[in-house]
Amino acid sequence: MLRRYRSGVAALLVTGVYAVAVVVAAVAAPATGELGPLWWLTLFVGPAEGATVTWPDVLVPLLAGAAWGWALWQGLRGPLAGPPPELDRDTRLLRQVLYVSAAATPLALVLPSWPWWAQVLLALVTATSVVLFQPVLGGSLEPAGFARAMGLLGYGGAAALEVLDVAGIPVPRALSAFCALAGLLWLALILRAQRGDGRWRRATFRYGVAGMVAPIVGGAAGALLADVAGVYAYAPGATSTLMVIWLTRTAHELADPRPRPARPEPVPSGAAPAGPPAS
């Protein structure tokens, strides 16, 4: 399995180290009464001061750690081993933008504060992918002009709204919701086009659909269960692993080796060439 991917060994080592650290922290939490290491490794936040160890406080972060470990493996293993195909400029740029977006997602969770200019930069990076997806998908993306308009409105609008907020200019909440809805609509159109494109596997498409839906469902569930245990308020952050996996798999599979066309069978020596069909 490791030889199947270009960076399989390195990915397994990094993922293994992370998995061992999470398991050790989970085992140590009930014994020591210290939840900090486990929560920081998996939820990227610290527990409330004086929090007691309960089974949700250990099990939920452990499940979140499993999700992040799987995302690490999916992202770091790279494309399939073999000679890479010749990629045009748009495809190469799109792969780079997708990797940047994938790396920024966990980084935003790890950093204690995410400066406004970083949020603007990330929104502009995603807006760049809106422009690049269109030539890469070609005729699979329909309606292409509408999809690009929705993507630029969603992510370009998010960058503009962030700048307006920093400048102290009030922004209607409805406008923010409209930009978010436009971004979701663009993603849905991209996923529909990706499903019909032979360069991507069906599993990649499914990760994208799950990554679009899970944060909405998880956020609602976390809000409802937050009063039961505080850990549930932070657990929905792990649903972002699905989008990280979709981003990295989408980039990987653009560089997977392409199947070679079958060679024609040689004509046996002495065999008469096929003549024209009878009229």
Image (cartoon, rainbow, N blue to C red):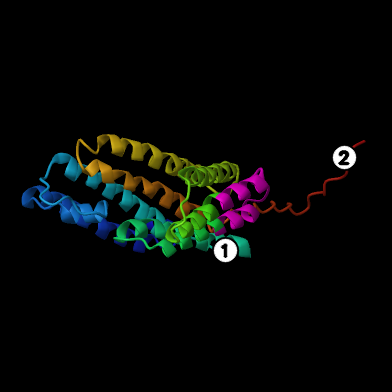
Q: Is residue 5 among the parts visible in the rendering?
A: no
User: Which quadrant: the N terminus?
Assistant: bottom left
**Viewer-side label of 1, 2:** 1
Q: Is residue 124 above or below residue 226?
A: below
Q: Please tell me which residue is depicted at 48% across the width and 43% down the height of the picture.
A: 177
93 vs 51, left or right, is: right
58 vs 201, left or right, is: left
Q: Secondary structure at mark 1?
A: helix
User: Which quadrant: the C terminus?
Assistant: top right
Foreground pick, 273 / 5: 5
Q: Which residues are magenta?
A: 128-153
Circle number at residue 191:
none
Q: Residues within 10 Å of mark 1 (few under 14, many from 20)?
A: some
Residue 222 picture location, percent across and down: 29, 39
Q: Please tell me which residue is depicted at 31% across the width and 52% down the height of the picture.
A: 69
Residue 180 picture location, percent across and down: 49, 45
What amino acid is labelled 1 in the image? Arg
Q: Secondary structure at mark 2?
A: loop
Instruction: Please say whether residue 248 is one of the residues in the magenta stretch.
Output: no
Q: Please tell me which residue is depicted at 83% across the width and 46% down the height of the picture.
A: 274
Residue bearing the label numbered 2: 277
What amino acid is labelled 2 in the image? Pro
- Ranked by sequence position, the earlier of labels 1 and 2 is 1
Residue bearing the label numbered 1: 92
Q: Residues within 10 Å of mark 2 (few under 14, many from 20)?
A: few
Q: Main secondary structure of the magenta part?
A: helix
Q: Is residue 212 above or below residue 262?
A: above
